[in-house]
Amino acid sequence: MAQIKAVLTILALTVVSLVLIPLQWLAIKAGHPVQRRLPHLWHVIATRLVGIRIHQSGSPGGDRPLLITANHASWVDITVIGSLMPLSFIAKSEVSGWPVFGLFAKLQRTVFVNRTRRTETGRTADEIAKRISAGDAMVLFAEGTSNDGNSVLPFRSALLGAATRALGEDGKVWVQPLSVAYKSLHGLPMGRQFRPHVAWYGDMELAGHLWGVFTEGALDVAVTWGEPVEVDATTDRKALTRDLEAAVRAMTVASLNGAGIPSRESAENPAPSLFSSGEKPVKAGADD
């Protein structure tokens, strides 16, 4: 039965994609504002078809320019975060060549980063700055790679320089930490040993992992927004990176260790403040 559900889900997503892909391509070519909303619509439909239930605490910042820094456990993160609001991602350049996923990333107007050429960091940062200055909310997976879903790896500071390059007319830009934590499967706590069912990292084979998520579905995901941080020309990039990492780690640990699943009403209780998490920052890793 689970296999039949997976096949039907894939067929439904294929139909939706065949409708939205040409529309998004035309919107990008024409520079129409709907290019920001069509990928969001696709992710909303995808999460519902697969059975991913998203429980938000806090809310995305309303000020612009905005750069969002999130932890990263799986390709599922893309659909979870993409369903929250219109936004675009920052991804490693290899993704652009992946079958299907590469096409979707391009249509999402992803900014690709060549991590093998450090000399391109400045160019990429300028491109990110241009996008967020134009009003696009951009998501940076600041760990630089995916993890096992049970922890948060050290954040890398190189691309956070884009925030200071995007200073608006009033000399300000906002960076907001975001935590994604996979809590339960079919209503039962997932636990450390079962979280790799959704986490995709290391040398895991993509097709098999994708099929596993489609056949199982029924995921509960806790998404926690931290407080946006105002950045100006005097902001220390490495200190900002350490603080963002500490905030995301504190929110992720709280979500994974908390009892039950937070409801949407929990947004009335603000997410942990970037500077009041109570957790000692961990030194960030080498720049990406």
Image (cartoon, rainbow, N blue to C red):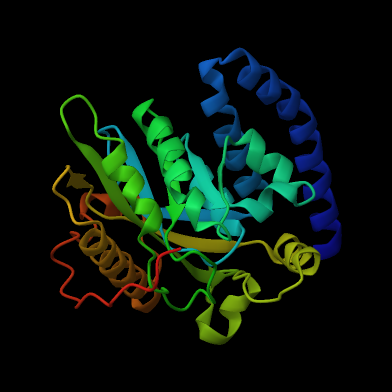
Q: Residue 185: x and y, percent?
A: 58, 70
For residue 1, say whether it is visible. no
Residue displayed at 86% across by 58% down? 4
In the picture provided, is 269 more to the left or to the right than 262? left
Q: Nearer the viewer, residue 176 or 167?
A: 167
In the picture provided, is 253 more to the left or to the right than 173? right
Q: Nearer the viewer, residue 129 or 119?
A: 119
Which quadrant of the figure has residue 188? bottom right
The quadrant the N terminus occupies is bottom right
Q: Residue 125: x and y, percent?
A: 41, 44
Residue at the outermost front position: 119
Residue 226's place in the image compared with 132, above or below, is below
Q: Residue 223: x and y, percent?
A: 40, 57
Residue 147's place in the image compared with 231, above or below, is below
Residue 133's place in the image compared with 11, above or below, is above
Which quadrant of the figure has residue 85? top left
Residue 131's place in the image compared with 13, above or below, is above
In the picture provided, is 107 more to the left or to the right than 237? right
Q: Nearer the viewer, residue 180 or 163?
A: 163
Residue displayed at 29% across by 62% down? 241
Q: Residue 149: x and y, percent?
A: 51, 74
Residue at the outermost bottom position: 193
Residue displayed at 49% across by 57% down? 118
For residue 91, say whether it is visible. yes
Query: What is the number of callouts on the image?
Result: 0
Which quadrant of the figure has residue 248? bottom left
